[in-house]
Image (cartoon, grey):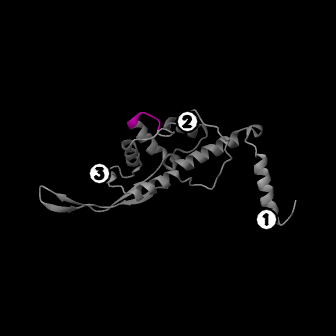
Amino acid sequence: MPISITVPGVESFDETTEKFVYTEDTVLVLEHSLVSLSKWESIFHKAFLGREEKTSEETLAYIHAMCLDENIDGSVLLRLSEENVRQINDYIEDQMTATTFREIPNAPSREKITNELIRYWMISFNIPLDYETRHLNQLFTLIKVMNLKNMPEKNRPKMSAAERHALNKQRQKQHGTSG
């Protein structure tokens, strides 16, 4: 699901004509997807996902790669307000799903995740190619679900004692019982 943000117009002075020039607001329609990721990686030749900090240039290039209108002038991106950037970050970080997972604590992945690896997962799980334009977090959730459902029962993550205790307390409260 794309997001629309309005980049405010600006007023500036044109020294050659000695007149004030007004730039209209610009609406950007952005999509955080596998397609955007692929565009960015083709420019910078490195994995976008990961812990490495992005430069301002890399960040603006990703926002540009997210634009559904490929004819957006790069100068529009230079006018992004702090609010615009916050909206974009919130959109990128949004899970876009009700599905949750019990994560294994302190289990960092050492595999570098690139758009080609994600496409491999899609092909392996027979995920339709139209998912490449879905929000990236929705695609990752689907891949995790497919992986868990294809995993033998004995290898699936188990509920911890603390999680079982909290679930029992919740059920006792819900049903008005004491044990």
Instruction: Indicate the secondary structure of the residue bearing disc 2.
Output: helix
Q: Along the line of sight, which residue is nearer the eye, 90 or 152?
A: 90
In the figure, is residue 5 to the left or right of 174? left
Label at residue 174: 1
Q: How many residues crowd around disc 3 within 10 Å: few (fewer than 14), some, or many (20 or more)?
A: few
The residue that mark 3 highlights is 75
| Residue drawn at point x = 68 percent, y = 47 percent | 102
Circle nearer the viewer, 3 or 2: 3
Indicate the quadrant where residue 42 lies: top left
Q: Is residue 9 above or below residue 32?
A: below
The range drawn in magenta is 43-47
**Dominant secondary structure of the residues highlighted in magenta in the image:** loop
Q: Along the line of sight, which residue is nearer the eye, 114 or 133?
A: 114
Indicate the quadrant where residue 103 lies: top right
Q: CA distance from mark 3 to mark 1?
A: 56 Å
Q: CA distance from mark 2 to mark 1?
A: 43 Å
Q: Residue furthest bottom?
A: 176
Instruction: Pick whichever of labels 3 and 1 is earlier in the sequence.
Output: 3
Instruction: Pick whichever of labels 2 and 1 is earlier in the sequence.
Output: 2
Amino acid type, label 2:
Tyr
Amino acid type, label 3:
Ser
Q: Is residue 85 above or below residue 123?
A: below
